[in-house]
Amino acid sequence: MALPSFLLRPAAAALAVFVAAAPAMAQQNPPARPAAPAQKPAAPAAPAAPQAAPQQGQQAAGPTLVQVKPEPSQTDWLKVCGEDPGNKKRICYTTRDFVSDQGQPVLAVAVYDIQGDPNRIVRFLMPLGLLLQPGMRFSVDAGQGQAGKFAVCFPNGCFAEGAVGQAVIDQMRKGNALRVSVQNQFTREVTFEVPLTGFGKAFDGAPIDPKVLEEQQRQMQEQMQKQAEDLRKKLEGGTAAAPGAPAAPAAPAKP
């Protein structure tokens, strides 16, 4: 399934990218990759960069707090499970995408739970334009910070991850926000405040049926195609009403 943007294709796109990027992000003992849904979405577009450069002569401000909210078309955290065909281990990941107050894509979060592994992996899709060497830190509310490292960057964003124990998962179940701190290219600290509402219910609950996920993807694709067609007709109608105006080009076909 091919979709044009991180914003328009939230959960399923993030899931596909998190899974597809797993081999490139692997460390010495990488987690196995879960079985992909039957229909594989395209990788999302790049999230927006968190900060602009300070103007010349302007003193750099302190740490910046960016409060994000769930992507509007995504009703809740989404849990998907699969079996690694190599070692037959069950792997689940619980994920959600987040946007700014203006509706711009900011980041995505996925928590991997691998059968038999006492640690979980918290994986992030972060915006481009961040300093990679300092790494990143994340914590639940005002709790103890957990270190994470950037692993690989693609045109759609950079991946970072950190291993956590059961205690951090318990905090995420009960907490209000996951605070993710990074440095932008101007060495200014930026902290994203990610709401955790609904995480515990999804993490502990049953995974979504792959057939249901596929149907949701199909319906969203049809909805986006209809919106594109409606926009095209609206543009053509407005152009026709203006004497002497050139005809509006047709909307490009969806990939």
Image (cartoon, rainbow, N blue to C red):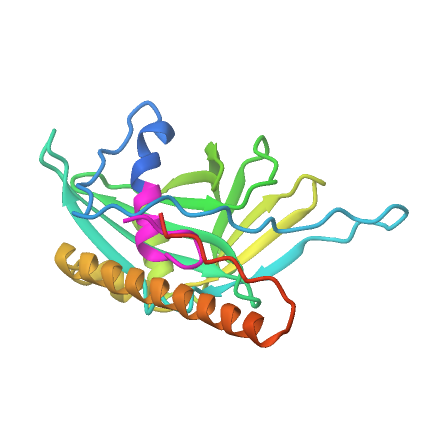
Q: Position of residue 102 (x, y in %)?
A: 57, 67
Residue toward you, 38 or 153: 38
Instruction: Locate residue 119 relative to residue 161 in the image: left or right.
Output: left
The extreme front residue here reads 244
Q: Is residue 145 visible?
A: no
Residues rendered magenta in the picture: 1-18
Above or below residue 109? Residue 229 is below
Residue toward you, 34 or 170: 34
Residue 15 within the magenta-colored segment of the rendering: yes
Q: Residue at x 52, y 50 (%)?
A: 47
The extreme right residue here reads 57
Residue 211 within the magenta-colored segment of the rendering: no
Residue toward you, 39 or 196: 39
Q: Position of residue 22 (x, y in %)?
A: 32, 34
Find residue 201 and report its image quarter: bottom left
Q: Is residue 180 visible?
A: yes
Above or below residue 133? Residue 101 is below
Q: Residue at x 56, y 48 (%)?
A: 181
